[in-house]
Amino acid sequence: MLEEEIITQRLEEMNTQSDPYVPFWPENCEGSRKALVIFVGPSPGGKKEINRRGIKLNQFKPCWNDAYMEPLFWSGGFNKSFRPIVETLIGKPYGEASKLIARVNMDWLSNPEAKDVSFRYMWEGCKYILPVIHECDPELVIPMDEKTFGVLQIALYNGGYEIYPARIGKIKIRISDENSKTRYHNSIMAFSAKRDENSFLVIKSLQHPARIFDSDYATRVGQSIRDAAKQIWSGDTVNLNI
């Protein structure tokens, strides 16, 4: 799981081979065609769109041996959190690590509040994002909030994936910095998904990256997800104290 060998292999493949022809991705699906890690959100942020419209298909050409820089400029939270999360997960500087990540959203209309995103349209959007996830053949998929985690789990099951809940033990992950009142995450949500030869882990982010404004906290989030992934991959119960 996220071992140096497979990371190097994918980077080398992109560096030495041409991008194979594959149709472009739908709107709000961006990042590397060889993503080992895929972040999944309920919808893009920004100003809420009122008028409903259909999704635009064939909108984004996936990256190939190019750093995926756009998330660093989405919001103050992403600016602080996304780089350390990705660097900690992949174990490389962002310029290299971001060649191995992608981001997809279930709904395609802008909405700054996840709680306001309709389950109906998140569910409808799954038929567009699941082919992208399957194409990338990731090792790790990270829903950015609990709502997305739940919808994705059902969509994968309905899509023919076998779902295996992770065994969760003792979880203690510090939220606050050392100068504030100490607060912790005491739970983590995760499962493995398998269909034919395609398998990956799904681990919910402890906090949505847009709501993380401390880079040290972001590093702990990345480390927690990485450590949990390695424990699940090894067949162990997840125990974290970070």
Image: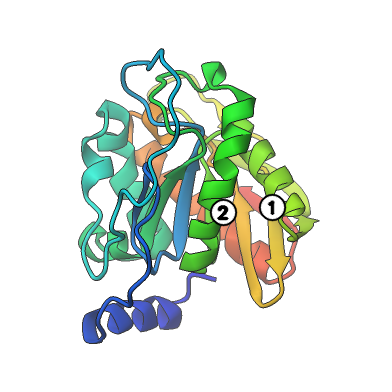
Given residues 143 and 46, the one toward you in this image is 46
The image quarter containing residue 94 is: bottom left
Distance between mark 2 and mark 1 Cα atoms: 8 Å
Residue 187 in view here: no
Secondary structure, mark 2, is helix
Front-most of 181 and 96? 96
Residue appearing at x 42%, y 58% in the figure: 89
The three-letter code of the residue at mark 1 reads Leu
Query: For this rendering, which residue is in front, 159 or 66?
Result: 159
For disc 1, the neighbor class at 10 Å (few under 14, some 14 to 19, many from 20) is some
Q: Residue at label 1?
A: 156
Q: Secondary structure at mark 1?
A: helix
| Rendered location of residue 69, percent (x, y) | 21, 50
- Tell me how many marks there are: 2
Identify the residue at image location x=57%, y=29%: 121
Residue at image position (66%, 38%) is: 151
Q: Mark 2 or mark 1, which has the lower sequence index?
A: 2
> In this rendering, would 36 be left or right of 58?
right
Q: In the rendered structure, which amino acid carries the disc numbered 2?
A: Leu
Label number found at residue 130: 2
Point out residue 125 in the picture as x, y percentages from the top left corner.
55, 39
Q: Is residue 50 above or below residue 179?
A: above
Residue 171 placement (x, y as % from top left): 67, 43
Which mark is drawn over residue 47? none
Residue nearer the viewer, 67 or 27: 27
Q: Is residue 232 left or right of 143 when viewed as pictured?
A: right
